[in-house]
Amino acid sequence: MIEVVSIINAAPATVFDLELDVDVHADSMARSGESAATSTGARRLGPGDEVTFRARHFGLRWRMTSRITAHDRPRHFVDEQTRGPFRSMRHEHWFEDAGAGRTRMIDRMTIRAPFGPLGAVASRLLLVPYLRRLLIERAVHIARLAEAADRRRDCLGPGADQNRCKP
């Protein structure tokens, strides 16, 4: 299992919604040329929705389809591979209120590689470190967007915190 924990200076609902936005996902993986197409055409995924990702990793073109199998806004959702390169892949996303307008975001990913014992070795030596790095890059991207969105919201309207809103 891969686990990445991030503290984000934004509300859980903001972070949750950004995590389910397929355009944000594709932008966070721009280095791999990732694109995403949803089963419904909607850009934000919901319960039961499927998304197919296409990207280049390890110099090869990959295609993977995942379905949202659990959805409890703004606390938790799960996506699981239905077709793709792994024997199985389950990605749990948890969003905990960390107080003071912050979110503790936890990504837990479990993969099973194909090709038996050889796949298990490749998974441990190559896939797990690579996927951990991708999850961290994605978390940094989400944090940047979420913090900017919450900051803009805090700076609008009556009662705005002008100290926080200075450029």
Image (cartoon, rainbow, N blue to C red):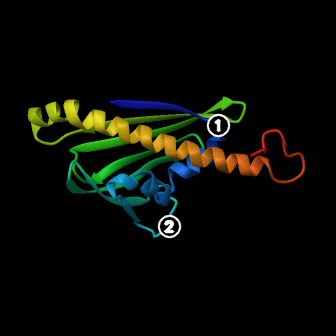
Which residue is pictured at 74% across the width and 46% down the height? 167
Instruction: Look at the image and tell me whether residue 45 can be seen.
Output: no
Which residue is pictured at 20% across the width and 30% down the height? 125
**What amino acid type should be assigned to the residue bearing mark 1?**
Asn
Residue that lies at the very extreme toward the front in this rendered image: 167
- 12 relative to 141 in the view: left or right: right
Which of the two residues, 154 or 107, is positioned nearer the viewer here? 154
| Eye-nearest disc, 1 or 2 | 1
Residue 60: x and y in percent read: 19, 54
Residue 42 is marked as 2
- 113 relative to 158 in the view: left or right: left
- 62 relative to 34 in the view: left or right: left
**Marks 1/2: CA distance?**
27 Å
**SS class of the residue under badge 2?**
loop
**What amino acid type should be assigned to the residue bearing mark 2?**
Ala
Q: Give the vertical position of 10 relative to 145 (above or below).
A: above
